Image: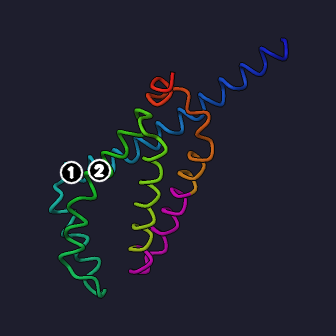
């Protein structure tokens, strides 16, 4: 196998690995939102209000956040699945996970905060490796 073929193959594998990771993260985020929408955003918001009842956060703000979170998760997940506006989507998802981490730490749910840290690392890796985002709508637009 020539060096040129090996380099092309390596780049193809990197693009494939990036696409698969982006898709898995997109499915995960989409399904977080879809499952919460399916069970009723009001029900999800009510659970959040109960979790945060012993914090100084006003219940109306927790309720409002709980109502919009499923739609935000669904939208960001679908954008990642498609590979559309990938950089902006990953930045938004990172800011969202930072907000969720704040909430988890605020109620001292360190297990959830640890999982959210894992999401943050994966989002950072996807941003860092975005040059391999070849199988996406973004790459089709760039051509």
Disc assigned to residue 82? none
Query: Is 49 above or below relative to 141?
Result: below
Query: Is 73 above or below relative to 11?
Result: below
**Quadrant the N terminus occupies:** top right
Numbered circles on residues, count:
2
What is the distance, in whole Å, between disc 2 and disc 1 at their CAs? Answer: 6 Å
Give percent across and percent down for residue 18.
58, 35
Most distant residue in the front direction = 142
Magenta stretch contains residue 106:
yes
Query: Is 87 above or below relative to 11?
Result: below
- Pick the front one: 142 or 58: 142
Give percent across and percent down for residue 77.
37, 44
**Residue 85's image quarter?**
top left
User: Are there few (<14), some (14-19), or many (20+) residues within 10 Å of tag 2?
Assistant: many
SS at mark 1 in the image: helix
Residue placed under numbered mark 2 in the picture? 33
- Pick the front one: 130 or 116: 130
Color scheme of the displayed model = rainbow
Give percent across and percent down for residue 126.
56, 45
Residue placed under numbered mark 1 in the picture? 37
In screen coordinates, is 142 left or right of 75?
right
Query: Is 82 above or below relative to 110?
Result: above
The chief SS type of the magenta part is helix
SS at mark 2 in the image: helix
Most distant residue in the right direction = 2
Circles 2 and 1 in contact, beta carbons < 8 Å: yes
Q: Which residues are magenta?
A: 104-120
In screen coordinates, is 114 left or right of 109?
right
Magenta stretch contains residue 25:
no
- Pick the front one: 68 or 86: 86
- Pick the front one: 109 or 1: 1
């Amino acid at each position: 196998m020539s060096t040129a073929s090996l380099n092309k193959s390596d780049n193809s594998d990197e693009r494939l690995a990036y696409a698969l990771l982006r898709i898995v993260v997109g499915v995960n985020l989409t399904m977080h939102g879809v499952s919460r929408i399916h069970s009723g955003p009001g029900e999800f918001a009510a659970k959040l209000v109960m979790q945060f009842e012993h914090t100084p956060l006003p219940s109306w703000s927790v309720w409002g956040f709980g109502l919009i979170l499923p739609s935000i998760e669904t939208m960001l997940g679908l954008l990642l699945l498609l590979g559309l506006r990938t950089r902006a989507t990953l930045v938004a998802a990172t800011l969202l996970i930072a907000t969720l981490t704040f909430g988890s730490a605020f109620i001292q749910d360190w297990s959830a905060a640890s999982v959210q840290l894992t999401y943050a690392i994966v989002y950072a890796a996807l941003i860092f490796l975005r040059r391999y985002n070849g199988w996406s709508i973004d790459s089709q637009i760039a051509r």
